[in-house]
Image: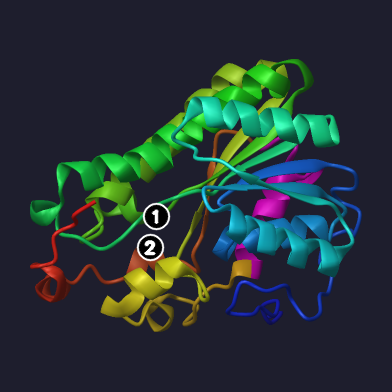
C-alpha cells in the first residue's frame, strides 16, 4: 500500500510536495474558499495552488487569511487574495465576491469550508449556540453558494464542494448542533446538484473523519483515540482531505454530482459513541 502523503501539523505550507495528480490540473482556475485561513481549508488552498489554481481566502479574521495568503503565494507562486467576510451576512458575501471577480475576472470553484463546532450535551446546549452553528455551517453555505450562483455560476457554470462531516451518520454523542447543520448541508448538496446541474454546475459534499493538525481534532478528539479505532488504524491528514477535494473540484470528477464523498478511513463504521464520555463535559453548557 502506498504510504500517505506527508503533512505538517501547523498551518504552514508543506516543506516539499510530490504531485500525485497532473501538476497543471487546475491551471488558471480560480477557487473561492471560505474558512481557508487555517486547518483543512488552508491545505485545500495550498494543494489547489500547487496544481496551478489561484485562490481567494475568505474569513471573518482578516489577519489570519492575510498571513495565510502570504505563506501560500510564497510557497506556490500562485496568486492568493485574502478577504474579510462573514458567511452569515449576505451583503458581506456579495461585497467579497465582487472583490474576487474584480481581481480575477471569474470564479471557477467554490469550497464551503467555514464551520463552527464544540462538544456539548444537547441538554446543556444554549439556544443561541445551536443557532450560531447552523447559521455558520448551513445558512452560510447557502449564502455563499447563492451569491456565487447569481454573480457568476448561473451564466458560466462552476463547481461547488461543501465540507461536511460524518457526525449525523449514527447520531454522534455531544454533536447535535454540528451534526444537524452538516446533515442539512448534505441535503442542500443534493437539491442544488439537481436544480443547478442544467447550468453546468456540479455540487458535491466531502465528509472528513478525524484529521490530524486541525482545530476540530484538538477540540473534539480528546474523548477517544480515533486514529487507532479506524479500520486503517491511523488518523487522516489535511493533505489527504485536500487531495480528495482536488479530485471533486477537477475535471477528473466531471460526471460526479450530488454525492457525499466520505474520507475518514472507514472510522464512521467503527468509531465508538461512548456515553461515558458525556461525564467529562456534562456540566459545561455552551454560552454562545
Identify residue for label 1.
166
| Relative vertical location of residue 174 with respect to residue 214 in this rendering, above or below | above
Q: Are marks 2 and 1 in contact (CB under 8 Å)?
A: yes
Residue 275 at least partly seen: yes
> Which residue is located at x 56 percent, y 23 percent?
146
Q: Is residue 236 left or right of residue 160?
A: left
- Direction front: furthest residue: 63
Give the quadrant of residue 147: top right
x, y percent for residue 214: 49, 70
Whether residue 252 is in magenta: the answer is yes
What is the magenta range? 239-256
Q: Which mark is residue 265?
A: none
Identify residue for label 2.
268
Number of residues whose C-alpha sits closer than 10 Å to that of mark 1, classed few (under 14), some (14–19) or many (20 or more): many
Give the quadrant of residue 242: bottom right
Towards the viewer: 189 or 140: 140
Whether residue 38 is in magenta: the answer is no
Distance between the Cα atoms at labels 2 and 1? 7 Å
> Which residue is located at x 57 percent, y 31 percent?
93
Sequence-earlier tag: 2 or 1: 1
* Nearest to viewer (mark 2 / mark 1): 1
Q: Is residue 145 left or right of residue 88?
A: right
Towards the viewer: 229 or 201: 201
Under tag 1, what secondary structure?
loop
Under tag 2, what secondary structure?
helix
Amino acid at each position: 500500500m502506498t504510504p500517505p502523503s506527508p503533512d505538517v501539523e501547523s498551518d504552514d505550507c508543506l516543506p516539499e510536495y510530490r504531485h500525485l495528480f497532473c501538476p497543471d490540473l487546475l491551471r488558471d482556475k480560480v477557487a473561492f474558499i471560505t474558512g481557508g485561513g487555517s486547518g483543512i481549508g488552508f491545505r485545500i488552498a495550498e494543494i489547489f495552488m500547487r496544481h496551478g489554481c489561484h485562490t481567494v481566502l475568505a474569513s471573518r479574521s482578516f489577519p489570519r487569511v492575510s498571513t495565510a495568503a502570504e505563506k501560500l503565494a510564497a510557497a506556490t507562486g500562485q496568486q492568493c487574495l485574502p478577504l474579510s467576510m462573514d458567511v452569515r451576512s449576505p451583503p458581506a458575501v456579495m461585497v467579497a465576491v465582487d472583490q474576487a471577480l474584480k481581481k480575477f475576472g471569474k470564479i471557477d470553484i467554490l469550497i464551503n469550508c467555514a464551520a463552527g463546532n464544540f462538544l456539548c450535551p444537547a441538554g446543556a446546549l444554549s439556544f443561541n449556540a445551536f443557532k450560531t452553528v447552523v447559521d455558520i455551517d448551513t445558512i452560510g453555505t447557502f449564502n455563499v453558494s447563492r451569491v456565487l450562483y447569481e454573480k457568476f455560476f448561473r451564466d458560466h457554470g462552476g463547481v461547488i464542494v461543501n465540507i461536511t462531516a460524518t457526525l449525523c451518520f449514527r447520531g454522534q454523542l455531544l454533536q447535535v448542533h454540528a451534526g444537524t447543520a452538516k446533515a442539512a448541508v448534505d441535503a442542500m448538496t443534493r437539491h442544488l446538484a439537481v436544480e443547478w446541474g442544467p447550468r453546468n454546475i456540479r455540487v458535491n459534499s466531502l465528509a472528513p473523519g478525524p484529521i490530524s493538525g486541525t482545530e476540530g481534532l484538538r477540540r473534539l478528539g480528546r474523548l477517544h483515540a480515533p486514529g487507532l479505532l479506524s479500520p486503517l488504524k491511523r488518523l487522516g491528514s489535511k493533505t489527504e482531505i485536500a487531495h480528495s477535494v482536488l479530485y471533486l473540484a477537477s475535471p477528473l470528477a466531471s460526471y460526479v454530482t450530488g454525492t457525499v464523498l466520505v474520507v475518514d478511513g472507514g472510522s464512521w463504521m467503527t468509531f465508538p459513541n461512548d456515553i461515558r464520555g458525556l461525564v467529562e463535559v456534562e456540566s459545561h453548557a455552551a454560552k454562545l
